Image (cartoon, helix red, strand yellow):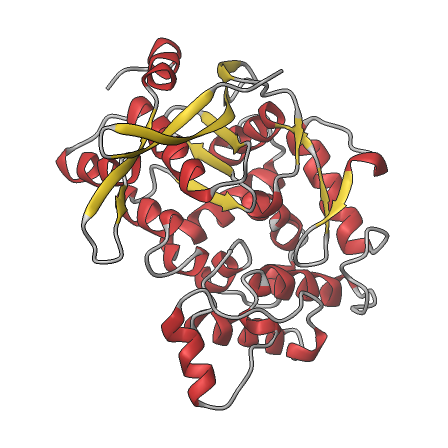
Amino acid sequence: MTNPALVDVTRGQLTESLHRGSVAVVDADGKLVCGVGDFEARVFPRSAIKALQAIPLVESGAAEALDLSDAELSLACASHNGEEVHANSARVMLMKAGLTEDDLECGPQWPKRMEDAAKLILADETPCGLHNNCSGKHAGFLGLAKVMGVETKGYVEPSHPVQREIRNVMEQMTGDVVSEDVCGTDGCSIPTYASPLNSFARAFAAFGTGEGLEPLRQDAAQRIFDACINEPYMVAGADRFCTNVMEGFRGRVFVKTGAEGVFCASIPELGYGVALKCDDGATRAAEVMMATVLEVMLELDEAKAKLLDRLVNPPVLTRRGAEAGVIRPRSEFLQMLKEALPAN
C-alpha cells in the first residue's frame, strides 16, 4: 500500500517536493478514531516511546529510591540537545545510582546546537555519553538495574533484565506481541521493536488518561506525564518542537519525537493517543503532521493558535533568511482529519 502524500514543500507558487505518511488516532477504549494511510504496518518507534520505556523505572520504585526529581525523570524520557543542563542532569542521575559516565553504553554524540558544540571545542574537550541525546534514558536504565540488583554492564542487550522488563511493559501497553524478527537496534544501542502505529496510539491514549491501567501503572504513567509537563525543557531543549508545544499547552498535550519521522502524543482531555510516521523519515514533515493533528482536534485560544500556525506552516528560508516557500499540510490531509476529528 502506498501511503498518501500528506505534506507539501513549496518554492514560489509551485510544490517542489512532498512527503507521504500515515497517522493513527485512538481513543482510551482502544477504538480507532482516525486512520490515514497504512497505520497497521509495523514501524520502529525509535525515541517516540521513551516515556513508555521509563514506566519500569517509576513502577518498580526505583525513581523514588533514587530520589529522581521531575527534571531528571523528564530527562529519562528525553531526546535532548546535549546542552550543558542536559549533560549535567544525566551526570547527577548516574551519581545517585553510584555510577559514572563510563557506565553509559549509548555512545558519544556531539550536541545538536552549534553553540553547545563550540563550548566543548573551545574547552579542548570531545563529547561523551552524557551529550548523547539518549543519556537521560540510559541513566534511568542504569538506575533501574542498580535498584533491581542486577549487573549494569550490558544493560542495552535484549536479554538483560532491564530490557526484558521494558519489552514486557511495551507489549502490555500496545497490546502487540513482538518477536525477534521485528527487533532492530536503535541508534543508542538498545533493542527497538516494530509495532503498528495504531498500537502505539493505543498505548499513548492509556498513558495520558490512565484508563485500562492497573493502579500502580496508572500512578507511574501520571508521574512521568507530570514530570515532562513540569520540565519540558529537559525533554528536548531550545528551539525544539516537543519543548515548545508542551510549554505552550501547559498540561493539555504530551508530545515526543522519534528518529526517522515518527511522532507520538497523548491528549488527555480528549482521551486520545496519536502515532504517526513520515515515510521518508523527514522530521520537518513529521512535525507538520503532528502540529496539523493538534490544530484540528483542539480548541485553541489566540496564543495557542499562533504557536501551532507557525508549526503547521513553517517557512522555507534562503541563506539570508528570506521566505522562499513553505512546508504545509496538503488539503486532502486536512480534509481527512476534519472528517474524523472534533472541529475547533
Q: Which corner quadrant of the image does residue 251 belong to?
A: top left
Q: Is residue 321 left or right of residue 221?
A: left
Count of picture labels:
0
In x, y percent, where is residue 328? Answer: 31, 31
Q: Residue furthest top?
A: 339
In x, y percent, where is residue 260? Answer: 56, 43
Q: Is 69 placed above or below 286 here?
A: below
Residue positioned 55% across, 58% down in the render: 76
Quick one: quadrant of the N terminus? Answer: top right
Quick one: quadrant of the C terminus? Answer: top left
Query: Which residue is nearer to you in this view: 326 or 128?
Result: 326
Q: Is 46 placed above or below 214 here?
A: below
Q: Residue furthest bottom?
A: 124
Residue positioned 32% across, 56% down in the render: 239
Residue positioned 43% across, 60% down in the render: 234
In x, y percent, where is residue 276? Answer: 51, 30
Residue positioned 46% across, 43% down in the render: 283
Q: Which corner quadrant of the image does residue 271 belong to?
A: top left
Q: Is residue 218 visible to us here? A: yes
Q: Is residue 220 visible to us here? A: no
Q: Is residue 32 left or right of residue 323?
A: right
Q: Is 147 placed above or below 123 here?
A: above
In x, y percent, where is residue 52? Answer: 60, 43
